[in-house]
Image (spheres, rainbow, N blue to C red):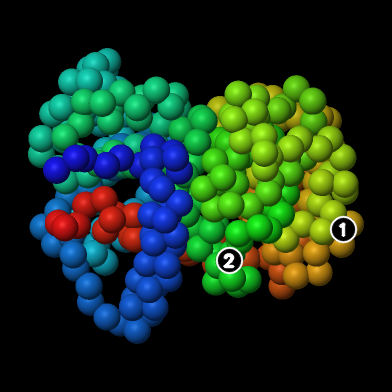
Amino acid sequence: MTVRHFLTLQDLTPAELKQIMHRGIELKAMQKAGEIFEPLKNQTLAMIFEKSSTRTRISFETGMTQLGGHALFLSSRDTQLGRGEPIEDSARVISSMVDGIMIRTFGHEIVTTFAQHSSVPIINALTDDFHPCQLLADMQTYQEHRGSIQGKTVTWVGDGNNMCHSYINAATQYDFNLRIACPEGYDPNMELVNAHKDRVEIVRNTLEAAENSDLIVTDVWASMGQEEEQKLREKAFASYQVNQQVMQQADKEALFMHCLPAHRGEEVTAEVIDAKDSVVWDEAENRLHAQKALLEFLMAQK
């Protein structure tokens, strides 16, 4: 049987992504009803963390427990990975003893190399280039609150980072239009933008980008590892804050999302993130349910 990996949204078909989204909603309802469902009984997910995490660790660890399996936390400080063992060797050894591997790391080539040498599914739980698991949660959240996102307009405000890259992939996979409002010098990967140019555009003016949008999304101005650029970024992104004025430009039914943690007063104002159209708390919880659907899809014995 061919091993499937989830390194970017492009690794699954649009139909499979839709299936996982609806399954996440089902699994959420089952869990809320107290139903015990353990398709991954006696299976182990190795979780490799080279970047710190709150939502990712809790959601994957809890998800594996709820599915009847076990999650094994591995940090680079505690394993041979941190002492320079080749990724290829680590992938072969770890995959020979577990049923799936989740990796949260820096360079995207780390997860691609792992996948090339692993005998079990590899899940990208964040790299510097992509954060596909967050998109599973975001798309499920939109579906729950507003129905299908197909044909809608989404506005990304801020840095052309890993979240922005995953939204670019999502535009094609979930069939929506994406406007990216970012300052010059902080653009997303232009090869990726050009590959999706039929539905992705860069707009320098935030208010213009937000006009009649159905979903406004942002992220911190300085991602992990960029803290020393904070002051420089505060100047560059000064006009790329999601505030009440931006939300008023959007459709009256528009939702606001943020992958968290948020810096109130920087990329988003407190009144926006705490407003009724903000679904950030449902979005955060849905990391659990969406990833359970992904784990079941990749690891359950068919």
| Residue 6 as seen in the image, left or right of residue 130 | left
Circle 2 residues within 10 Å: few <14, some 14–19, many ≥20 = some
- Quarter of the image with the C terminus is bottom left
87 over 97 or under it: above or below: above
Residue under the point 30% across and 40% down: 5
| Residue 39 as seen in the image, left or right of residue 277 | left
Q: Which of 289 and 227 is in front in this view?
A: 289
State how many labels appear: 2
**Quadrant hosting residue 201:** top right
8 over 189 or under it: above or below: below
Q: What residue type is labelled 2?
A: Ser
Farthest front residue in view:
198
In the rendering, at what x and y percent does residue 292 appear? 33, 60
| Residue 285 as seen in the image, left or right of residue 74 | right
Residue under the point 20% across and 31% down: 118
Secondary structure under the numbered disc 1 in the rendered image: helix
**Quadrant hosting residue 149:** bottom right
Secondary structure under the numbered disc 2 in the rendered image: loop
Q: What residue type is labelled 1?
A: Gln
In the rendering, at what x and y percent does residue 274 appear? 71, 66
Q: Which of marks 2 and 1 is nearer the N terminus?
A: 2
Q: Distance between the residues labelled 2 and 1?
A: 21 Å
In the rendering, at what x and y percent does residue 137 appear? 49, 57
Q: Name the residue under label 1.
A: 249
Tell which tag, 2 or 1, sits nearer the viewer.
2
260 over 274 or under it: above or below: above
Please indicate, yes or no, whether residue 37 appears anywhere in the rendered image.
yes
- Quarter of the image with the N terminus is top left
